[in-house]
Image: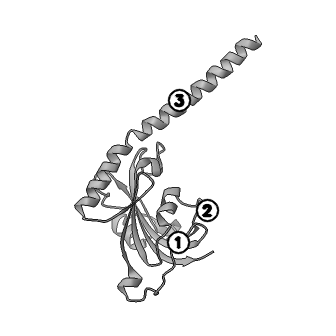
């Protein structure tokens, strides 16, 4: 009896491990196509980007401090452990970004695209995080490292760097994303 129980437990454990591996493999089948779509989109815009890891694409669209001529001579860059204040927009990405965000803290965007949305419970204040603190997607934190105050950064994420095989709100599983982050303030730690 004890031998059968041990065999059953081992069979169950192996089955769970195999299921987990197959599930991960299944979600990663989307990544090469998503990577290609993101690369094509950025190439069509002649956008120079940085690749963080194997499939997080970072495009710095500009810096409002530099545009205003107020960028410090030696600007500070974001490092793990720094506190950060930013505004954001998040879009589903297929072969191009969706025409409206699925998540944002910009009231004017919500008013424009979701006029019937009851925003009385919505937080439109800038987000405050500690980089590396796990308050946002790890891939977004990694993409922010090395950026400067005032940067406007577009971060393109393949599904394995976004929500993976989980649905999140209106975002379906295995979906690529584009986040636009506007770095407002950096506090070095």
Query: Could you tell me residue 127's position as x and y percent?
Result: 53, 70
Query: Could you tell me residue 8's position as x and y percent?
Result: 66, 17
Q: What residue is rendered at 42% in x and 40% in y?
A: 28
Q: Secondary structure at mark 3?
A: helix
Q: Secondary structure at mark 1?
A: loop
In front: mark 2 or mark 1? 1
Q: Secondary structure at mark 2?
A: loop
Alpha-carbon neighbours of circle 3 within 10 Å: few (<14), some, or many (≥20)?
few
Marked residue nearer the N-terminal end (2 or 3)? 3
Q: Which residue is mark 3?
A: 19
| Of the pair 108 and 150, the residue shown nearer to us | 150
Q: What residue is rendered at 23% in x and 60% in y?
A: 44
Verify CB contact (< 8 Å) between mark 3 and mark 1.
no
What is the residue that sits farthest to the bottom in this orientation? 69
Applied colour scheme: one colour
Q: How many marks?
A: 3
Query: Could you tell me residue 40's position as x and y percent?
Result: 26, 54
Marked residue nearer the N-terminal end (3 or 1)? 3
- As displayed, is residue 90 above or below residue 184? above
Image quadrant where residue 112 sits: bottom left
Q: Which residue is mark 1?
A: 78
- As displayed, is residue 27 above or below residue 113? above
Q: Which residue is mark 2?
A: 133
Alpha-carbon neighbours of circle 1 within 10 Å: few (<14), some, or many (≥20)?
many
Image quadrant where residue 109 sits: bottom left
Can you say which quadrant of the picture contains the C terminus?
bottom right
């Amino acid at each position: 009896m004890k031998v059968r129980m041990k065999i059953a437990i081992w069979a169950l454990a192996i089955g769970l491990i195999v299921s987990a591996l197959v599930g991960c493999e299944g979600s990663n089948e989307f990544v090469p196509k998503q990577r290609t779509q993101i690369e094509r989109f950025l190439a069509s815009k002649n956008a120079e980007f940085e690749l963080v890891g194997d499939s997080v694409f970072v495009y710095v669209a500009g810096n409002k401090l530099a545009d205003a001529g107020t960028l410090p001579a030696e600007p500070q860059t974001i490092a793990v452990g720094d506190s950060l204040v930013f505004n954001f927009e998040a879009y589903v990405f297929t072969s191009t970004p969706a025409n409206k965000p699925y998540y944002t803290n910009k009231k004017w965007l919500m008013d424009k695209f979701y006029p019937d949305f009851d925003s009385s419970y919505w937080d439109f204040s800038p987000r405050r995080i500690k980089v590396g603190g796990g308050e946002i997607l790890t891939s977004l934190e990694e993409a922010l490292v090395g950026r400067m105050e005032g940067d406007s950064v577009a971060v393109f994420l393949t599904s394995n760097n976004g929500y993976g095989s989980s649905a999140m709100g209106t975002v379906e599983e295995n979906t690529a994303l584009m986040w636009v982050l506007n770095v407002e303030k950096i506090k070095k730690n």
